[in-house]
C-alpha cells in the first residue's frame, strides 16, 4: 500500500513531544522527504521563494517576500493554531538573498532538519523546519524554477 506525504510526515513527527521521533538521518533521507512533499504538493509556477506548510492533513504554499513572523498570535504573518506553538515563535528573514530563521525564545523550540536550534541560523534549499506540530519546507528559486539541491 502506497503511503502519502501525510503518513510520511506523521511518522517523522512524534506528536507526544516536540522532538522529531524519526529525524532524517542523512542528506538522502532529508531529500527523499522533501521530494515526497513536492510530489504531493507541487509548488505554483514562478521563481519566488516558497514555503510549503504542512498542517494536519493539508498542505499549502506561501510565497515569501522579505520576512515572515510565525506563531499562535493573530499578529503573525503565519498564524499557527496548533499544539506547542508560542505566540511569537520564530521569524524567517531574507538578507542579501540569504534566508535565516530566528527562534524568538519560544517555549518548545524550532527544529531544522530534526535538530533543535537556538538563536538563528541560515536556511538552505529543501531545509525542513518543524514548529510545534507543523512541518515547513523552504524552496529557493533557481534559473530553472524551484527545485531541491542535490
Image (cartoon, rainbow, N blue to C red):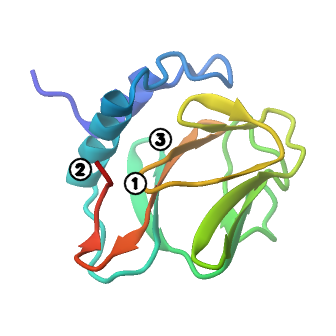
Q: Position of residue 84 (x, y in %)?
A: 74, 35
Which mark identifies residue 59? Answer: 1
Q: Nearer the viewer, residue 131 or 101?
A: 101
Which mark identifies residue 86? Answer: none
Question: Earlier along the polypeptide chain: callout 1 or callout 2?
Answer: 2
**44, above or below 7, in the image:** below
Q: Are marks 1 and 2 in contact (CB under 8 Å)?
A: yes
Q: Position of residue 20 (x, y in %)?
A: 57, 23
Identify the secondary structure beneath mark 3.
Answer: loop
Q: CA distance from mark 2 to mark 3?
A: 14 Å
Residue at screen point 43% across, 20% down: 25
Q: Position of residue 119 (x, y in %)?
A: 83, 46
Which mark identifies residue 40? Answer: 2
Identify the secondary structure beneath mark 1.
Answer: strand
Q: Nearer the viewer, residue 102 or 86?
A: 102
Residue at screen point 53% across, 16% down: 21
Which quarter shows the N terminus?
top left
Q: CA distance from mark 3 to mark 1?
A: 8 Å
Foreground disc of the pair 2, 3:
2
Residue ID for mark 3: 56
Q: CA distance from mark 1 to mark 2?
A: 9 Å
Image-quadrant location for residue 118: top right
**Relative side of 24 to 17, left or right:** left
Give the class, few, some or many, for how many residues have Cα within 10 Å of label 3's Cα (few <14, many ≥20). Answer: few
Residue at screen point 60% across, 36% down: 133
**1, above or below 108, in the image:** above
Question: Earlier along the polypeptide chain: callout 2 or callout 3?
Answer: 2
Q: Nearer the viewer, residue 8 or 67?
A: 67
Amino acid at each position: 500500500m502506497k503511503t502519502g506525504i501525510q503518513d510520511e510526515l506523521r511518522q517523522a513527527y512524534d506528536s507526544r513531544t516536540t522532538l522529531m521521533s524519526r529525524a532524517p538521518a542523512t542528506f538522502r533521507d532529508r531529500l527523499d522527504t522533501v521530494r515526497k512533499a513536492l510530489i504531493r504538493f507541487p509548488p505554483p509556477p514562478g521563481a519566488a521563494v516558497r514555503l510549503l506548510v504542512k498542517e494536519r492533513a493539508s498542505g499549502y504554499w506561501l510565497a515569501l517576500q522579505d520576512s515572515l513572523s510565525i506563531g499562535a498570535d493573530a499578529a503573525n504573518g503565519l498564524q499557527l493554531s496548533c499544539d506547542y506553538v508560542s505566540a511569537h515563535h520564530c521569524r524567517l528573514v531574507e538578507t542579501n538573498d540569504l534566508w535565516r530563521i530566528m527562534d524568538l525564545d519560544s517555549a518548545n523550540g524550532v527544529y531544522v532538519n530534526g535538530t533543535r536550534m537556538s538563536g538563528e541560523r541560515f536556511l538552505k534549499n529543501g531545509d525542513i523546519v518543524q514548529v510545534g506540530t507543523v512541518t515547513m519546507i523552504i524552496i529557493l528559486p533557481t534559473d530553472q524554477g524551484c527545485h531541491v539541491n542535490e
